[in-house]
Image (cartoon, rainbow, N blue to C red):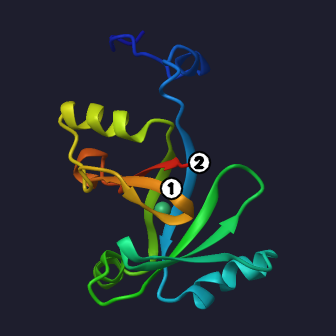
Amino acid sequence: MSNLPPHQPFSSSARSIKSPELDIELDHIGIAVENLPAGFEFYKALGFAAFDVEEVPSEKVRVGFIRLGNQANLELLEATTQDSTVRKFLEKRGPGIHHVCLRVKDIDGLVDRLKSAGVRMVNETPKMGAHGCRVAFVHPASTGGVLIELSQKMG
Ligand code: ZN
């Protein structure tokens, strides 16, 4: 017999008790690459024919979206300037997973709530990201080491 205290199992019921405002889904996983065509090679081998390219001046990146068969996508990130955070990431850590993006419904309310909970934000206020979304990044220091992008689809 274990003397460990009973733990709270993480079950599907945990999802059903959340409030409706916590309508959060995985939107995409951001992957830093040296350049988009080279980064796309593997996905081409998987059978993907193309990716959508968009420049995001606010982040100094060009992104290539690989649309998967569900609601979540992969986002390849290529730096467009030497002072891009993605350029710095590549120099420090090399290519690889850069961030995880969660799709939210009320980004302003959520960012306010996180800030008042003491969560460290990279962006204190949401800004424009790719695909006409408003985004705000949460600092890895507050998330267990993962850069989290919060994104709200506008319009
Ligand atoms: Zn992203």
Residue ID at (74%, 50%): 70
Task: Give residue 135's position: percent from left, percent from top.
Answer: 41, 54
Q: Nearer the viewer, mark 2 or mark 1?
A: 2
Q: Amino acid at mark 1?
A: Cys
Task: Give residue 60's position: percent from left, percent from top.
Answer: 37, 79
Q: Which numbered disc flags the more N-terminal residue, 2 or 1?
A: 1
Q: Is mark 2 within 8 Å of ligand 1?
A: no
Q: Which mark is residue 144?
A: none
Q: Nearer the viewer, residue 49 or 60?
A: 60
Q: Label 1 belongs to which residue?
A: 133
Quarter occupied by residue 75: bottom right
Q: Residues within 10 Å of mark 2 (few under 14, many from 20)?
A: few
User: So how many labels did they put on this image?
Assistant: 2
Residue ID at (17%, 36%): 118
Do the residues bearing badges 2 and 1 touch, measured as CB atoms within 8 Å?
Answer: no
Q: Nearer the viewer, residue 11 or 79?
A: 79
Q: Residues within 10 Å of mark 1 (few under 14, many from 20)?
A: some
Give how far apart the Cα atoms at labels 2 and 1 are.
Answer: 9 Å
Q: Amino acid at mark 2?
A: Gly
Q: Label 2 belongs to which residue?
A: 155
Task: Give residue 95's position: percent from left, percent from top.
Answer: 44, 79
Q: Is mark 1 within 8 Å of ligand 1?
A: no
